[in-house]
Every structure is written in structure tokens, then in C-alpha cells.
Image (cartoon, grey):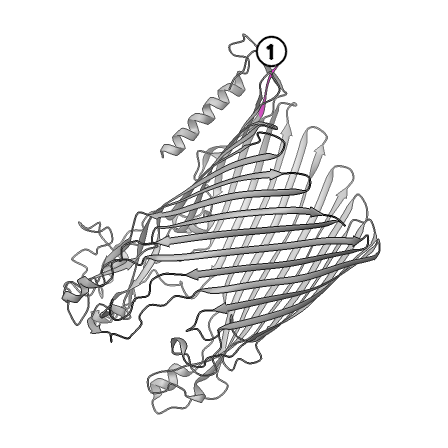
Amino acid sequence: MTSVKRGGSLLLLAGALLANPGAGRAQTPDSILSGSAELGWRSFTNKPSAQQMAKFEEYRDMGTGPVLQNLRINYQPGDGRRKYELTAADAFRLDQALAGRAQQPGLFDLRLGWDRIPHTFSTDARLVAGSGTSSPFSLPSTLLRTLADTTAWRAAPFIGPVRTGWDVAQAVLTVTPDAHHDITADFTNIAKSGSRPMSMSLNATSLYREFLEPVDQNVRDLKLSESYVRRRYQVQLAYDLNAFDNSNASVSVTNPLLATSSPTAGSSVGRAALAPSNLAQTFTVAGGLNLPFRTRVNSTLSYGVRSQNEPFIPYTSNSALTDSRLATEPTSLNGDVRTLLANFTATTRPFRAVSLTARYRYWDFDDRTQLFTGKQIPLEVITDRSITAFADTTVVTERFPYRKQNAGLELRWSPIRLVGVQAGYAWERWNRAEGLEVATTNEYTPRLALDVTPADWISLRASVSHSNRLNDGYADGTANDNFNGFRRFNMADRDRNAGDLLAQISASDRLAFSANYSIGHDNYPNSAYGVQSDRNTVLGGDVSYLVGTRLTVFASYTYELYRMGELNKYRDGTNPNNGTFDYQIDERDLMQTGGVGLTGTLVPKRLDVEFRWDRSRGATLLQTRNPRAPSATTAASIANATATDFPEISHTWNPVHVSFRYDVNPNWSASLGFSHESWDSYDFRTAGLGTLVYSSASPAAVSGVPLGNDLLPYKADYLTFSIGFRPHLSRAARPIL
């Protein structure tokens, strides 16, 4: 709240200066003050209910009442060397933004900014938890072990919006002491606060609790760089310090079915670790060199150090589980990761019609985090219900360093001015740590592109590529207890084909048209199980036309289709490798967006109009089938292995906006706008979460305590009225800032 008040004071001061630029006349009559402001009012004719506001206000503040939509103030002192600027948008709201700038070209440039970014998760959540004395997420004693009575659940009130807010503050200062040097300091602070939904499985049973994770985090990033530029070469040195701080190391919730912890039944309290505080530093040197024969070489070398040594949370939250050896186990991770990046690019143009580019990139992720074995961790806590001992030789922690290399060569040839042909070849290699299914993969990608410009008003571009990724052998069934034939999509052999087509046409000063079409197909020829095929198709275009001399109409449309096929296997204790338990997954994601609109002037210098209608629809369908009918000795196994289709998940968004702006005179204007939005969705995963899942016959059969988060459909109609002030340049008697 302090930040909002400070920002408001700054805007009030700026408004006073803008309204009275000539106050205190005494000196320097050449100072210039200019700016503009737009103050509006929003009112709903059809407002969504409090429980429907989550999606409507997901990343914005749509509250009613006054809003300072835009403010801009420019000031230039009489010497004419320095410039000052202040801007604001949606002031005094949850999504407001402020920015300031002071500069003297050739000497310094200071930019300040502050943005507020809200993220609303839910407005229809119910929290079946009292405030408690030890935790805001403890259940009232009257609810413990009595959740089969849903009266308490249904009587629980809706809580306020579940929301996080990001306050992003940035300051960038660039100093140019001479024509060859630039020194830049860039500091960004992101403060995150609020709460968001989180769930926990208690004692590894079917019972889960959904609750609110408290968010109190800070991300601080400082970048320092110095550049030295000469005609033949350029050099830059940089340092980046990034610190993440989380005020909450963990979060705890009470178990609704256990009032007292038990060494066999589990803990009465569940605890989960949250993201730990950490630190990252990166040192970079980069340079460029101009060589004869129109040749240039660029290179970058950076080294990073990442560390994290936050204390571990207790190994168990079950006070009934005790063992003296737990006190001797490690208390922190001592995480240590080093990164190395080397990037080289060389471009030459030995002939007018021929250019050649070579690239190489090396990335090394060196995980030096200490490994713990059974000697350091002699005990393992199983689901807060039991303790078992590790053998001394058992390695219980892992690390996964890797190296990645990319190289490429591109040749471009323009036999005539209207045609350009580009051929390229790329190589990518991964080297992974031991213990994974694949140690090394290599991918080779030839690519061909053609540019045709038969006239100044038309441009065509087409490209095709084919890549082949091969691994050096897949370790079957060894990592993470995978079954034979299963292949992870990021390490499996893969054939990839892709094509793109782009056309841009400007037939006249009135008509402009563009269209794009792309297809892609990933095939996994040696994966008996896992992802088999992944296809995508994207088709889109937009057109605009100038009607008369003052009105432009436009339209756009995009169609995206993604299809993936996967073969998997159901397994249980008695059927670890039953061939009839295979099932095929076919997933389809479809997205369509389109819109039409117009913008222009109805009455010259008096009346402007803007209209836009958009429609966006997305749908996800997951279908499954068994290639063969499941066969087993128990009916339960057969039922679990039988494939079942899932209902389609869909959402549709329709915004409509029309507005008119009337210019009273060159300084003043008035605007009136009407907006309509409707959003509809169906998601079987969240539908009905507002009802507690329980068994009246056995309270112990309660399977979950949800918050009831379910984004509800909405319809909204609202009016926005604003007055704009855009004065001509004003001359002040003396400097104002």
C-alpha cells in the first residue's frame, strides 16, 4: 500500500505542474513543458458476480469508478540539453504502471519504472479452516474426523480473491563518458506477495488437502556492463547477480482425519517445503571484430556460479516417529552448480551475391552438489508412517550434469535481385550424466529456404527442414523402474520434418495482406512405448483495407492444430508386464482465433471511431483405447487396465469493443466506449470441486478437502468515459523539475 500512495503523490504533483506550468516565473524563459492526460470512469451495465470474477480479472484490475488511464509529462530545461519524462497508466489500480526518464544525449540516460502485475487464481474458493492459533491453515477441532458431515463444508463462506501480486521496480542508468564507452547499471526488484492454491497428499494416502500457500518472495537482479566500441572491434564486460529470497521455507496443514500423530497411521500435520532461497552470479565477456573481405566475427564467453544452501525442513512432521540417528543426518543441501557458455559466430560476404555464416555454441551444466549416501543418510522416512534403514552402500541422491553443443553453417545465394536461396546444416549434441537412460544424442538438420520478391509489393518465403536425432543406445528398464521398450521423448530417436510458407502482399496503398502456413511432424521410429507421433499445423492470415481516405477495416484469423499419439502400459503388482494392458492415447489440441474491426475518422478533426470483435476458442480432447482386450486373473485389474475416453476440455472467449472520441478543440477531447466480454469453459478436472468428496458410511473414506477452485463462465458489459487533455507546448519561466 505504501508504494501505491507514493505513486499517487507523484502523479498529483505531476498533475499540478501540468495544470500550472507558469507558476513562479523568474528565470530561463526557454524551459518547455508539454504532456497529456486521460482521466476516465468505468461503470458496468452487466457485472459478473463475485464468484465469476476470477477469469475476468485474471491479470488486470477491472474495478468500477475513476481511473487515470494515461498520463505523460515532458519537460526540457532552457539549456536544451537535458530531457525529463514521466508516464503513468491505470494509476491507483492493481495493474498500474509508472515510468520516468531523465537523459542528456551523449552523457547519461536514466530510466525508472514500476509495474504492478496481479494474478487472480480464484474467486469462488471455500476454505474449510479456522484461523487457528498455530497456523492459518489448521482445521477447527469440530471438523476433525467428522468431515462426512458436509454441513460444515457447505456453510463455509467464500474467501476473498486468491491472488498474487508482482511489484516490479526497475532502474537503468547508462553513462556515456565519451564516444567509445558505455557503462550501464540495471537493477530490478520483483516483490511477490499474496497467496495461491496448493495441495498436499497426507501420509501418502488418497486423502489430500488443498490450501493457500503464502507467497512472500523477492527476486533481485543487478546487471553491470561496460562496452568499448571502435570502428574495427567492440568489447563488452558484464556481471549479473541474481538473488531469490523466500520468506517461507515450508507450509504446514492439519490432517482432517487424525487428531493425534501415530507411528503407524501417520502424522496429524502435513508439511511441504517451498522454493528455497538461492543465489546466481554470471561473468561475461563478449566482443566483435570486423575483418577484411566483408567479414565479421562475434564471440561470447560467460561463466556462472549458482548456489543454494537453505536448511532442510525436518525429515518428518510426525512427532510419534523418533530415532536418535535422525539428528545426525545432513541439515542442508550445499547445492553448487557451475555453468559455462561459449558462443561464436562468423559471417562473411566474399561476393555480392553470396554470404556465408558459421555458428558454434557450447553449454556446460556442471552440477557439483555433494552426493549423500547411506552413510550420511542412514534412515528413510516412509510417508510419515514408518522409518527404514539404508544400506551403507546405497546412493540416495543424484545429480545430472550435462553438456550441449550446437553448430551450424548457412549459405545464402542471390543469383538475381528478386530471388534468394538459403541452404543450411545444423548439428546438436547432448552429453548427459551417467545413470540416465541415454548418455549421448546427436541430431542433424539440413534446411533449405527460398525468398522471392517479384515486385516491391509482394514477398514470398518458403522453407523446409528435416532432422534426424539418434542416441548411442537406450538403457532399458534401469532408470526410474521403466519397463522395457519405453522411451522418453526427449532422449528417444526422432525424425522431424517441418515446412513454412509466408506471403506478404501490399497491392496498393489501400490494401495489405499477409498469410502464413506451417506444418511439422515428429516421428519416433524406435519407441515401442512412449510418444509415437507429434503433429502440428498452423494456418493464419490478416488483411487491412483503407476505405476512402479516413477509414481502415481489418480482419485476422489463426488456426492451430496439435495432435500427439502415445502408446503406454498399465501395470500393477501382479501384472508388471501384461501385454494385453497396453493402451493408446490420442490427444488433440485445437485453437482458433479471429477478429474483425475498423478504425478511422468519421468527421475530420472532430470524431474518431474504433471497433473490434474477436473470438477465441480452444479445445482439448483426450481419447484412449486398448489395442487388445485386457485379460487378467482379477476383475479389478481388468477394470483398471481398460481404456476410457476423457470429456473434452473447452473454452471460448468473445470480446467486443466500440468507442468514439470527440475532439472539442486541439487541447481537449472526450471518449465514450462500450465493451462486452463473454467467456465459457468446461473442464471435467475442476467441475464439481465445490462439493466435498466423502462417504457417509465411513468418515475415513474422505478423499479430499478442496478449496473448490473452478473458473466460472461470465458475461460482462461495461462503459468507459474519459476526458483527454493534450495541450500545446507551454513555456515556463523557470525550470520546474
Magenta segment boundaries in residue numbering: 28-35
Q: Residues within 10 Å of mark 1 (few under 14, many from 20)?
A: some
In percent of width and height, residue 7 lies at 43, 30
In percent of width and height, residue 179 lies at 63, 31
In percent of width and height, residue 412 lies at 76, 58
| SS for dot 1 | loop
Q: Is residue 332 above or below residue 485?
A: above
In the image: residue 243, left or right of residue 508: left
Quickly name the residue at label 1: 29
Magenta-span inclusion, residue 34? yes
Q: Nearer the viewer, residue 426 or 268?
A: 426
User: Identity of the amino acid at label 1?
Assistant: Pro
- Specify the principal SS of the magenta part: strand
Q: Is residue 268 visible?
A: no
Magenta-span inclusion, residue 612? no
In percent of width and height, residue 646 lies at 46, 72
Q: Is residue 134 visible?
A: yes
Image quarter of the N terminus? top left
Q: Is residue 263 above or below residue 95?
A: below
